[in-house]
Image (cartoon, rainbow, N blue to C red):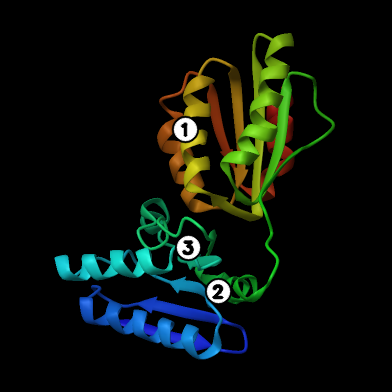
């Protein structure tokens, strides 16, 4: 079953999957969206509110889902994914193939923010900003918005390469606060490559965030890294700064 709330004034469609996805429910979704497009000559942005990771009931449901994505992937401009499910954010089965759309993740308690973002013409792009006031061997950065592969290429990679020329070992302070929305699919791959490519570059890594999915992943992968990795709450930002300076 899929609840569908199309709001003409905001030009958005709020889609709430409940239980297993059936071919009939996906066909109804496609019919509602297509009728709206034909009647208004506008393509709605999507707000997908999924409390849990939905699964397809059978192969027909999977095929219907793929057909829906194929028919809309190049025309939908924005997809807001609202969920606290860590598994859903990692899998991203509902939004990964909307290749032409900007995708942002919002927590359950931020659904109003998701709706507000989806109805806006402009976007809040991802930024990696260097934080001043640290020793030369410390790279301190703050991540905001949706981080893309281009953000890595333009800012982080050359910054680390330049600092590594002057220092045998570096330290990294990475702050991901309430305005950090996650990574695009390309950036997630770049993040993995960046991490494996710099296993011996950093002696210490401090991650400052309240995002549970980041904290869980950092604690899992941190034990495999030769560098010392510590995760701090946002309320412990000053402690993180003192630790990374030590």
Q: What residue is shown at x 54% (from left), y 24% (from top)?
A: 228
Instruction: Examine the rendering and report whether any part of residue 95 can be seen.
Output: yes
Which badge, 1 or 2, is on the more N-terminal residue? 2
Instruction: Examine the rendering and report whether any part of residue 58 can be seen.
Output: no
Q: Secondary structure at mark 3?
A: loop
Q: Secondary structure at mark 2?
A: helix
Tag nearer the camera, 1 or 2: 1
Name the residue tied to disc 3: 74
Q: What residue is shown at x 21% (from left), y 70% (from top)?
A: 61
Q: What residue is shown at x 62% (from left), y 72% (from top)?
A: 113
Tag nearer the camera, 3 or 1: 3
Name the residue tied to disc 1: 192
Which badge, 3 or 1, is on the more N-terminal residue? 3
| Quarter residue 28 falls in | bottom left
Per the rendering, the mark at residue 111 is 2
Q: Is residue 207 above or below residue 82?
A: above
Residue 231 in the image: x percent, y percent?
A: 56, 39
Q: Secondary structure at mark 1?
A: helix
| Quadrant, the N terminus | bottom left
Q: What residue is shown at x 40% (from left), y 51% (from top)?
A: 90
Q: Is residue 142 left or right of residue 47?
A: right
Residue 237 in the image: x percent, y percent?
A: 70, 43
What's the CA distance linking mark 3 and mark 1?
Answer: 27 Å
């Amino acid at each position: 079953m899929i609840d569908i709330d199309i709001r003409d004034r905001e030009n958005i469609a709020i889609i709430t999957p409940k239980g297993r996805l059936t071919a009939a429910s996906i066909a109804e979704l496609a019919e509602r969206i297509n009728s709206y497009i034909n009647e208004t000559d506008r393509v709605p942005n999507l707000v997908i509110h999924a409390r849990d990771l939905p699964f397809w009931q059978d192969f027909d449901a999977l095929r219907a889902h793929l057909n829906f994505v194929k028919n809309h992937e190049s025309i939908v401009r924005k997809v807001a994914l609202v969920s606290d499910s860590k598994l859903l954010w990692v899998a991203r089965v509902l939004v990964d193939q909307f290749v032409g759309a900007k995708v942002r993740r919002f927590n359950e308690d931020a659904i109003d923010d998701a709706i507000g973002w989806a109805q806006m013409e402009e976007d809040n792009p991802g930024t990696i900003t260097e934080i001043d006031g640290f020793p030369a061997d410390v790279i301190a950065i703050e991540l905001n918005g949706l981080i893309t592969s281009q953000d890595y290429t333009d800012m982080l990679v050359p910054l680390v390469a330049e600092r590594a020329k002057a220092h045998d070992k570096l330290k990294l302070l990475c702050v991901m606060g309430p305005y950090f929305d996650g990574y695009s699919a390309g950036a997630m791959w770049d993040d993995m490559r960046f991490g494996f490519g710099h296993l011996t570059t950093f002696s210490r890594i401090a991650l400052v965030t309240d995002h549970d999915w980041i904290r869980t992943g950092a604690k899992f992968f941190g034990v495999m890294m030769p560098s010392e990795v510590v995760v701090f709450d946002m309320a412990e930002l000053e402690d993180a700064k003192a630790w990374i300076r030590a």
